[in-house]
Amino acid sequence: MSDVQIIARDYITLWNETDAGVRARRLGEQWTASATYVDPLAKVRGTEEIGAYIGGVHQRFPDYRFALIGEPSGHGDHVRFSWSLGPPAGEAPIEGSDVLTLVGGRIAGVIGFLDKVPQPA
């Protein structure tokens, strides 16, 4: 497994972690303390804010899980991959793509894109 695959897998594992304490530990191990996360719904800085944002996603979608779509790619200090968010069985209603910037092998920044979202009825 390549470093890019490991980074993407660990990132998805973090987003699936429901225990705030475990999530905080993983953030401390895998992200820089001043990391930033930006997507169409949020702009947060630091592992505490990022952890809280992930917790909010769990509250909004309590039984949904993240999964990688396809193969991650990367070059230099950047990793790119696509993901889905949905119920464990069935089609995921949400998909996105993230671009990570690494510093010293740790995540220092994420720019997230929502590629597929449910349309209001």
Image (spheres, helix red, strand yellow):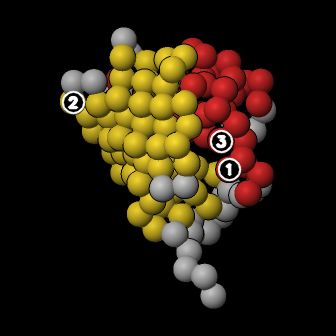
Quarter of the image that includes the C terminus: bottom right
**Residue 103 coordinates in the image, percent (x, y):** 36, 17
Q: Which residue is mark 1?
A: 57
Q: Which numbered dot is residue 75?
A: 2
Mark 1 → mark 3, Cα distance in angstroms: 6 Å
> Which of label 1 and label 2 is nearer to you?
1
At 54% from the left edge and 30% from the top edge, which residue is drawn? 45
The answer, for residue 5, to whether it is visible in the render is: no
Q: Quadrant of residue 109?
A: top left
Q: Which residue is mark 3?
A: 53
For numbered disc 1, what is the local secondary structure? helix
Mark 2 → mark 3, Cα distance in angstroms: 27 Å
Q: Quadrant of residue 92?
A: bottom right
Q: Amino acid at mark 1?
A: Val
Q: Earlier in the sequence, mark 1 or mark 2?
A: 1
At 48% from the left edge and 31% from the top edge, which residue is drawn? 36
> Which of label 2 and label 3 is nearer to you?
3
**Residue 83 coordinates in the image, percent (x, y):** 46, 52
At 40% from the left edge and 43% from the top edge, which residue is drawn? 111
For numbered disc 3, what is the local secondary structure? helix
At 45% from the left edge and 59% from the top edge, which residue is drawn? 114
The answer, for residue 43, to whether it is visible in the render is: yes
Q: Which numbered dot is residue 40?
A: none
Q: Amino acid at mark 2?
A: His
Q: Amino acid at mark 3?
A: Tyr
